[in-house]
Image (cartoon, helix red, strand yellow):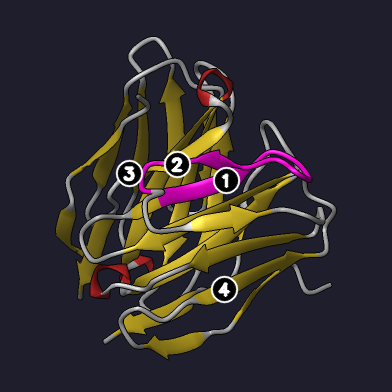
Amino acid sequence: ELKVEQNPLFLSMQEGKNYTIYCNYSTTSDRLYWYRQDPGKSLESLFVLLSNGAVKQEGRLMASLDTKARLSTLHITAAVHDLSATYFCAVGSMEYGNKLVFGAGTILRVKS
Amino acid sequence: NAGVTQTPKFRVLKTGQSMTLLCAQDMNHEYMYWYRQDPGMGLRLIHYSVGEGTTAKGEVPDGYNVSRLKKQNFLLGLESAAPSQTSVYFCASTPGWGTEAFFGQGTRLTVV
């Protein structure tokens, strides 16, 4: 069974601080995604990571993938209030019939 | 370009009633997914399809049925609604392996 675990589930941080969200998954993955969701809204794609060692950056967010450790991280640099949202990682696997399975999400609150 | 469109956006059902949620995409995507989102549980995969005429069970398929008679449409049916099916339902589509999934705006369903 394909399982995806995120931690922490809730993160409250001060503006200007750095932090990392972790995403662990249970089996061989073909693709790893990060999404953002604002309250009452749909999901917005942030990153798609396809290979071991992949690193992608957009603004204050950087995502990386270590397929050997079955771990992806989303690093937040110098947080600002606008980054407050819920962040999800999702794992897709051809081994599991192309399912796309999500983690429980990390609620991020950036305090001024 | 509409992307992924879900119909309806809101619905209130009485226990035991049936209904169908429609997901339509105009991007010629092969893969389509139905999720439900409940507080603290992230998105859970209900059913998915890897092409026209195909469907497969996800993590929480009980109480739901799906059909993919046309490539652009993925229907989610509730034959006899229960209060436990109160949730926000999201549909997503993707061209295939290695590409991001695009989400609809969600359907908020309440079963009373």
Image location (x, y in percent) of residue A29:
49, 21
Between the residue at mark 2 and the residue at mark 4, the CA separation in whole angstroms equals 18 Å
- Amino acid type at mark 2: Gly
Q: Pointers 3 and 1 in contact (CB under 8 A)?
A: no
Which residue is labeled 1 in the image? Answer: B48
Residue B109 sits in which quadrant?
A: bottom left
> Mark 2, mark 4: which one is toward the viewer?
4
Using a 10 Å C-alpha cutoff, classify the residue at mark 1 as few (fewer than 14 neighbours), some (14 to 19) or many (20 or more): many
Quadrant that contains the C terminus of chain A: bottom left
Between the residue at mark 4 and the residue at mark 3, the CA separation in whole angstroms equals 27 Å
Say which of A103 and B82 sits in front. Answer: B82
- Amino acid type at mark 3: Gly
Q: Is residue A40 left or right of residue B95?
A: left
Which residue is labeled 3 in the image? Answer: A103
Q: Residue B20 carries which label?
A: 4
Using a 10 Å C-alpha cutoff, classify the residue at mark 4 as few (fewer than 14 neighbours), some (14 to 19) or many (20 or more): some
- Residue sitting at 74 percent across and 67 percent down? B3
Q: Residue B58 carries which label?
A: 2
Between the residue at mark 3 and the residue at mark 1, the CA separation in whole angstroms equals 17 Å
- Residue sitting at 72 percent across and 37 percent down? B96
* Residue stretch rendered in magenta on the structure: B45-60
Q: Would residue B52 be counted in the magenta stretch?
A: yes
